[in-house]
Image (spheres, rainbow, N blue to C red):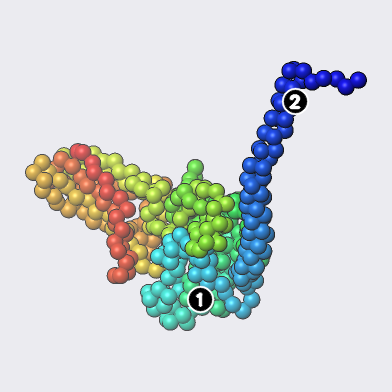
Amino acid sequence: MKRSCGPKDRMQHMKEEYRIRNTEHKRRNLCPVLCLLSSVSCLLCSAFCVLIPALVVGCASFEHLTNVSNEMPKAKECGKCHVEVYQEWARSDHARAYINPEFRQATNDYAFESCLSCHAPEPSATDRPPRLRAANREDGITCVCCHLDQGKLAGPMEPTGAVHPHPVAVRPEFYRSSKMCGGCHQGTFDEWNLAAGDKPTCQQCHMDEVVRKVTQPTSGVSGLLVATEKTAVLRRHGFPILGQHIGDKVLTVRGGKNGAVLTLEVKNNLPHILPTGEFGFRVLELTVIALDGRFRDTVLGRRELAPEASSAIAARGTLTWDLQVPPDTTKALVRLQRRSYEDTPIIVLANVELDL
């Protein structure tokens, strides 16, 4: 016997029909969204699959940076990715090491070959004196001289980018040590080794800290590569004589006046002699100026410091100097300047004022 459909059954049937239709409606509305997401996903996947091989193929052009034979990679090749490092290096004395007119004259137009190897060295990631390279000597002390190590480009930190365009070696124990500079700066390195106590490395004084990425973008593709890198504390490659770490710490000056005599104690705070260096012309000029209450100044004395004249101040050593002063002297100004060749600017290394 067929059961009749009462009000409750009809209500239940209507609810079930509504649920089915509502589900179908949502499915029809969701389908275009799912299709769109699927299409975007496919496009991204396709782009990724095309980009990575393109990057790998594009990076093949960097092989010549690590496979050195008769040719020597030029710094501008490294500068295509390491833009800021290249710009700093290009303004440095390292970039002009071989073409420097004073160096060329001092070597009798490069006739004294024993002097040339540190100004155009072969790659040598060691603390041993380098050999003179045959090609691209005009680049001086260029990138691969310090960073090419057995077919890899070496440095102090792990790379953070997603793609490595060339083989990489990580040697923090070498690249953060003064040994790295000792192969060429042998005399200064020996002085540094003999200096007692805690002391900064060459890099800490002459390679200023900077927060940045290792590379900088120059195109759309390189921009994608750089975007995957992390910012880190790195070092600049300008190699200044007076770096930020040194600042006003070159000298400590103490003094006292006893009648008409001013006794000064000038201490060299650096872990090498002042001035250091074995070749070329560089002289430090130490000047003491007396100041009175009416802002008049009188030069009390001037002394040249140079290793050749046995007048350099020893590493962490102290120079004592007695000077005659006018009776109304209230202050003394002690100034240390570095003079070199005529086309080289004078550098003020210290400017210390003493109340007397």
Where does the C terminus fall, quadrant-wise?
top left
Residue 137: image tag: 1
At label 1, the amino acid type is: Arg
Name the foreground residue: 268 vs 348. 348
Mark 1–mark 2 distance (CA, rounded to whole Å): 92 Å
Furthest-left residue in this view: 294
For label 1, the crowd category at 10 Å Cα-Cα, with few meaning under 14, some 14 to 19 and many 20 or more, is many
Mark earlier in primary sequence (1, 2): 2
Residue 75 x, y percent position in the rendering? 51, 69
Residue drawn at x 65%, y 53% as measured from the top left = 39
Q: Is residue 318 visible?
A: no
Residue drawn at x 23%, y 39% as measured from the top left = 256
User: Which marked residue is nearer to the observer: mark 1 or mark 2?
Assistant: 2
Residue 13: image tag: 2
Report whether 271 appears left or right of 248. right
Report whether 55 appears left or right of 120. right
Name the foreground residue: 116 vs 239. 239
Q: In the picture, residue 254 is in which quadrant?
A: top left
At label 2, the amino acid type is: His
Residue drawn at x 45%, y 50% as measured from the top left = 210
Q: In the picture, residue 94 is in which quadrant?
A: bottom left
Residue 111 x, y percent position in the rendering? 47, 82
Residue 13 x, y percent position in the rendering? 75, 25
Residue 139 x, y percent position in the rendering? 48, 72
